[in-house]
Image (tube, helix red, strand yellow):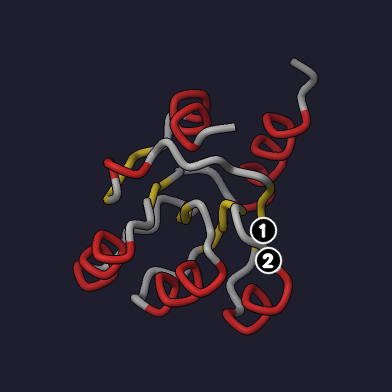
């Protein structure tokens, strides 16, 4: 599923990376501990976190994530958005908590078409 479809369905706010919303999402990972995300997430995943600092972009780039979704209406810093644009990583924001957003994305990704 393309990031665009997730954004439309869940009414996410795109903060940066609008030119890269055609990336394919193959799964997801929810976590705030950077070392945990580095060790357990995979290429093509959408990462759900409440972290807003620029190190999230470094991790997402290293793991080749499709994008990052910030929960609870958390807003990325300006430095984070600038780095994400440079690395071609979309960052979106949701008002939902991690548990609820994770479930909704899981359901979208596993729905029988």
Q: CA distance from mark 2 to mark 1?
A: 6 Å
Q: Quadrant of the N terminus?
A: top right
> Which of the two residues, 56 or 73, is positioned nearer the viewer here?
56
- Residue, disc 2: 41
Nearest to the eye among marks 2 and 1: give it.
2
Label 2: element kind: loop
Q: Residues within 10 Å of mark 2 (few under 14, many from 20)?
A: many
Q: Is residue 81 left or right of residue 3?
A: left
Which quadrant of the structure image shows residue 110?
Answer: top right
x, y percentage for residue 97? 58, 50
Label 1: element kind: strand
Which quadrant of the structure image shows residue 38?
Answer: bottom right
x, y percentage for residue 102? 67, 46
Q: Is residue 10 above or below residue 59?
A: above
Q: Is residue 45 left or right of residue 10?
A: right
- Residue, disc 1: 29
CB under 8 Å between callouts 2 and 1?
yes
Q: Residues within 10 Å of mark 1 (few under 14, many from 20)?
A: some
**Residue for point 67% across, 63% down:** 42
**Residue for point 67% across, 35% down:** 104
Q: Is residue 14 above or below residue 45?
A: above
Q: Is residue 33 above or below residue 1?
A: below
x, y percentage for residue 6? 52, 32
**Residue for point 27% across, 70% down:** 83
- Earlier sequence position, callout 2 versus callout 1: 1
Which quadrant of the structure image shows residue 33?
Answer: bottom right
Q: Quadrant of the C terminus?
A: top right
């Amino acid at each position: 599923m393309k990031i665009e479809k997730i954004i439309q369905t869940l009414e996410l706010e795109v903060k940066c990376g609008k030119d890269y919303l055609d990336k394919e999402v193959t799964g997801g990972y929810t976590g705030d501990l950077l070392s945990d995300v580095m060790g357990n997430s995979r290429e093509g995943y959408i990462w759900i976190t409440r972290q807003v600092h620029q190190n999230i972009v470094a991790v997402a780039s290293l793991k080749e994530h499709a994008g990052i979704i910030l929960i609870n209406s958390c807003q990325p810093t300006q430095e984070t958005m600038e780095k994400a644009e440079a690395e071609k990583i979309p960052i979106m924001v949701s008002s939902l908590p991690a548990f609820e957003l994770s479930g909704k994305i899981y359901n979208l990704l596993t729905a029988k078409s």
